[in-house]
Amino acid sequence: MTTINWAALQTAAKQAAAQAYAPYSQFPVGVAVLAENGQIFSGCNVENASYGGTVCAERNAIAAAVVAGQRKFSVLMVYTPQEKLTPPCGICRQVIAEFFLPESPIASCNHLGQQQSWSLQQLLPDAFTPTYLAASNKINKE
């Protein structure tokens, strides 16, 4: 397993948050993901006047890594300049479950230097994963 450089992840997430497009919520978010090969990929939230068109930082970071050919990740770090540490939203937790192991650390940090970590299992117990789709292929379709 790759050694976790928490400071590098925090820096990458904070830099990504500085690029966030959040004119509606005023809630910039930056994320850094550590790929299995040791590379760090980042993303920021990009809001849209049609709120449903907004894309969260977590999904943007994962998408950037997937475009680069990565499919397995070990750590995700969220940065927000808020006093309260912020975990990923529900839809992002589902996307994270597609690429991370249940025991993967999902961390949050802020401008005050605080950090908190959860496992993916804690954030999304009994996640719907590809294993459920594989099981559905075995159902008798008579």
Image (cartoon, rainbow, N blue to C red):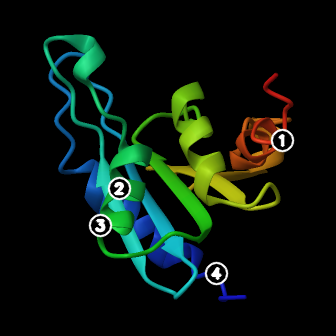
| Mark identifier at residue 29 | none
Q: Would you name the residue on which mark 2 appears?
A: 63
The residue mark sitting in front, 3 or 4, is 3
Q: Whole-percent x and y of residue 82?
A: 45, 34
Q: Amino acid at mark 4?
A: Ile
Q: Secondary structure at mark 3?
A: helix
The residue mark sitting in front, 1 or 2, is 1
| Mark identifier at residue 67 | 3
Q: Amino acid at mark 2?
A: Ala
Q: Secondary structure at mark 2?
A: helix
Q: Is residue 66 above or below residue 121?
A: below
Number of on-image labels: 4
**Residue at 44 percent of width and 46 percent of height:** 58
Q: Whole-percent x and y of residue 29?
A: 36, 41
Q: Amino acid at mark 3?
A: Val
Q: Nearer the viewer, residue 83 or 89?
A: 89
Q: Amino acid at mark 1?
A: Lys
**Contact (Cβ within 8 Å) of mark 3 with mark 2:** yes
Say whether residue 9 is left or right of residue 99.
left
Q: Is residue 35 above or below residue 104?
A: below
Question: Which picture quadrant has residue 52?
Answer: top left
Question: Which picture quadrant has residue 80?
Answer: top left
Q: Would you name the residue on which mark 1 appears?
A: 138
Tag 4 or tag 3, which sits nearer the N-term? Answer: 4
**Residue at 42 percent of width and 76 percent of height:** 40
Q: Whole-percent x and y of residue 117?
A: 72, 53
Q: Given the current orientation, which residue lies at the most extreme top position?
A: 50
Distance from Cα at disc 1 to Cα at disc 2: 30 Å
Distance from Cα at disc 4 to Cα at disc 1: 39 Å
| Mark identifier at residue 4 | 4
For the C terminus, the image quarter is: top right
Characterize the local packing of mark 4: few (<14), some (14-19) or many (20 or more) Cα atoms within 10 angstroms.
few
